Image: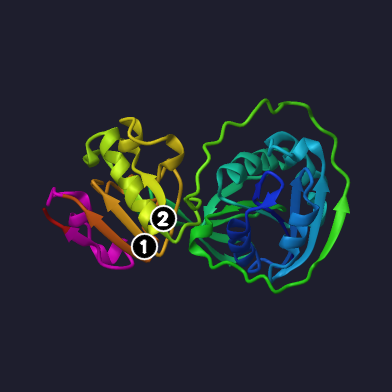
Amino acid sequence: MAVLLLAETKGSELSVDQTAKAVTAAQALGDVTVLYASAGCSSAADDAAKLDGVTKVLCADDAAYGNGLAEPIADLIVSLASDFEHIVAPATASGKNILPRVAALLDVIVISDVTGITDGNTFERPTYAGNAMQTVQSGDPKKVLTVRTAGFDAAASTGSASVENISAAANPALSEWVEDKVQASDRPDLTSASIVVSGGRGVGSEENFAIIEKLADKLGAAVGASRAAVDSGYAPNDWQVGQTGKVVAPDLYIAIGISGAIQHLAGMKDSKVIVAINKDEEAQFFRLQITDWLPTCSKQCRN
C-alpha cells in the first residue's frame, strides 16, 4: 500500500521532528512518499529525503503554498490522491486544518489524532479527553488520518530517497494570506522540546508567571500553560497544553500550580517523567490513579 505524507513546514523549512515522527507511524501502512508543499522548498525537500523509511519526496514549489493556506494545499493533495491509499499528516494545527478539507473533497471520513495503527484499515485514537481508547475501522477507499506524533519515535536521517519536483495544482483562490504575527523566542518549540515547564492558575498572576519563564530559560525548556492560566491572561494561547491546546511528550514535564484536570492530562500524559508542584494536597494530580494515567510517578512538593 502507498502512503502520501504531508510534511510539516515552517515557512520554507522542514519541521524535522514532527515529520520524522509521522514517517515512523506511516511506515506501518506501506511505502511512504513525502509531499513537501511550500515556496522555495528545494533544500528542505532534500532534508525530508534523508529520513529513514521515505521512498520518494514530491516537492511542490509555488508561492500559493508559501504560507500554509489550507485550501490550495488540500487541492494539491487531492490531485495526487489517486496513487495513494492512505493520506497522512501530523496532528498539528496545520495538519488538522488541511486534512479535513482533503477528506471532504474525497468524500471520506477523517480519522484524527491516531496513536496506534493495527493494520491498513484499523486505527487507535483517544476519546473522552483520553479517558478511553477508541478503535476505528474504516472501509473508505482512501484513508485520511492525522497522527499524534508524541507517541512515535522520530525516524533517523540516514536515508537517501529521490526528490521529484511537481507542478502546482490550480489555486481555488478561496483564501489569501495577509500577514503573520509571530512572537520571536529562543526557546525550543513546545511540541518538540525535551523539557517543558508549565504553569497554571495557581501561579496567581501574570507577574508571577514570569517565574515559570525564568525557570524554563534556566533549563533550556519550553513554556506551557493550562487553559485556566491562558483564560486568566497569564500566558498566550499558543502556550496552552491540553485537550484544546497542544499535545506534548517531553522527557521531563514540570507542572506548577496546575490542578491536573483531565483536559490538561490529555495533552501531556505521555511525558516520560512528570513533576507536579502544588500547595493544594487535594489537587487532582495527586488524586489520580498514577498507574492508570502516568508512565512514571508524579512527585508532590509541599511548601
Amino acid at pointer 1: Leu
| Residue 286 seen by the camera | yes
Quarter holding the N terminus is bottom right
What residue sits right under mark 2 in the picture? 221
Give the amino acid type for the residue marked by disc 2 in the picture: Ala
Q: Position of residue 209 (x, y in %)?
A: 30, 40
* Residue range of the region highlighted in magenta in the rendering: 279-300
Q: Is residue 297 one of those drawn in magenta? A: yes
Do tag 2 and tag 1 residues touch (Cβ < 8 Å)? yes
Q: Is residue 55 magenta?
A: no
Residue at image point 56% right, 35% down: 182
Question: Does residue 49 lie above or below 166 as drawn?
Answer: below
- Tell me: residue 30, above or below residue 180: below
At 61% from the left edge and 67% from the top edge, which residue is drawn?
24
Query: Where residue 218 appears, x then y in whole percent?
Result: 36, 55
Mark 2 is surrounded, within 10 Å at the Cα level, by few (under 14), some (14 to 19) or many (20 or more) other residues, namely many
Element at badge 1?
strand
Q: Nearer the observer, disc 2 or disc 1?
A: 2
The quadrant in which residue 277 appears is bottom left
Please give left or right for residue 169 compared with residue 212 in the image. Answer: right
Which x, y percent locates residue 160?
78, 71
Q: Which residue is drawn at 60% across and 64% down?
A: 25
In the drawing, does residue 145 fall left or right of residue 273? right
Of the pair 182 and 244, the residue shown nearer to us: 182
Q: Name the residue under label 1.
A: 252
